[in-house]
Amino acid sequence: MLFRSCSSSSNQPWSQPVDTLPDFAHFYATVDGLRLHYVRGGNPHGEVLLLLAGFPQSWYAWRKVMALMGDRYDIIALDLPGQGDSDKPQTGYDTQTLAGKVFGLMQKLEIERHYLAAHDVGAWVAWPYAMRYSQQVIKLALLDAGIPGITMPDALPVTPDKAWKTWHFAFHLLPDLPEALIRGREDIYLEWFLRRKAASPLVFSDEDIAEYVRLMRQSGALRTGLAPYREVTVSAAQNVMLCAQGKLTLPLLAISADEGSIADMATPLRQFAGEVTGITIAHCGHFIPDEQPKALSEAMATFFR
């Protein structure tokens, strides 16, 4: 049951229903002094499915998948630290630190085992999470992302037909300049970023763009959205050390898109994981959960069985 509670006599957390998703609600939990926002709902008797989004998105990126998979799973869609409506600390944006906060939330919610699906920067965080806390994860799905120190290429493409997909990596690494150019123009930046990287610009409505503009205009949000990029060398070194201890042992589904950023997720991951299944979603750009939620939901449900 979803409800609001402010009474000190209640041992239930405060929640607010999600207007567009029946049986889902907004929640907050404090982990290591950080207030994390997440949306939870679906089948309260189902196995837990944890969802992590990337830049420049939030839990909202998974809303269509949540509606399709909620009958089977108890779904938690988390805003990582610095993302969405979660707190935006000054430090702690290497992916191993972020993974530790995710683990802290799972402990707080008393969740011992769960499935995990993650996209973009969320996949960056999911990799060290699965490596360090493999006892937590039943199976893992990673969507259209190169993992720092693992499968992320050392050099970015410079030819016009490919450079537009990854140019932002170098741009986001620069100190101060992205903030100077984007601040006050968040709508222009986000409209290009979301609609250009999708196979069809019509995937993102004006309401969708407005939600991400709202989030990026929050105090500190632009800084913290860029922070994982600026910590990418730290994250890469951490992942190299983790992989020196052995391969990822749990089953991994590597999901590419035919018009996405990473043409083949699966092949390079097989060097670092023992059991990799690869699929490609057709008629899809980078934002797989938004663009092809039905195909994605069916693929994940089949893999998670």
Image (cartoon, rainbow, N blue to C red):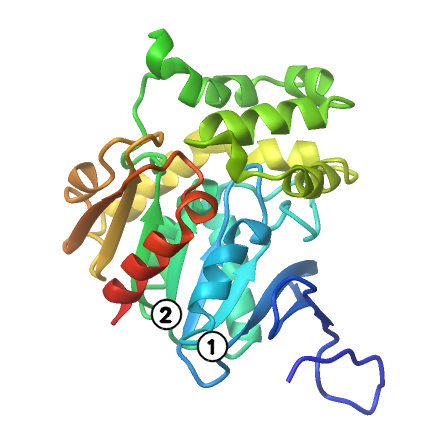
Graded by Cα atoms within 10 Å as few (under 14), some (14 to 19) or many (20 or more), the crowding at tag 2 reads some
Residue at coordinates 65% horizontally, 62% vertically from top-left? Answer: 20
Graded by Cα atoms within 10 Å as few (under 14), some (14 to 19) or many (20 or more), the crowding at tag 1 reads few
Structural distance between the alpha carbons of marks 2 and 1: 8 Å
Instruction: Give the camera-side residue of 70 and 51.
Output: 70
Q: Pinpoint residue 57: horizontal percent, then vertical percent.
A: 57, 42
* Residue 129 visible to the viewer: no
Residue 14: image tag = none
Q: Is residue 19 found left or right of 141 in the rendered image?
A: right
Q: Is residue 109 found left or right of 68 in the rendered image?
A: right
Which residue is most to the bottom? 9
Quarter holding residue 175: top right
Residue at coordinates 55% horizontally, 23% vertically from top-left? Answer: 172
Q: Pinpoint residue 27: horizontal percent, then vertical percent.
A: 68, 68
Instruction: Give the camera-side residue of 75 and 91.
Output: 75
Q: Quadrant of the C terminus?
A: bottom left
Dot 2 and dot 1 residues touching (CB under 8 Å)? yes
Residue at coordinates 22% horizontally, 35% vertically from top-left? Answer: 264
Q: Is residue 115 found left or right of 92 in the rendered image?
A: left
Residue at coordinates 21% horizontally, 60% vertically from top-left? Answer: 251
Residue type of the residue flagged with mark 1: Ile
Q: Pinpoint residue 69: horizontal percent, then vertical percent.
A: 42, 67
Q: Pinpoint residue 126: horizontal percent, then vertical percent.
A: 40, 52
For marks 2 and 1, the one nearer the N-term is 1
* Residue 151 visible to the viewer: yes
Residue 111: image tag = 1
Residue type of the residue flagged with mark 2: Gln
Q: Is 219 situated above or below 22?
A: above
Q: Is residue 212 found left or right of 303 in the rendered image?
A: right
Q: Which residue is mark 2?
A: 136
Under tag 1, what secondary structure?
loop
Under tag 2, what secondary structure?
loop
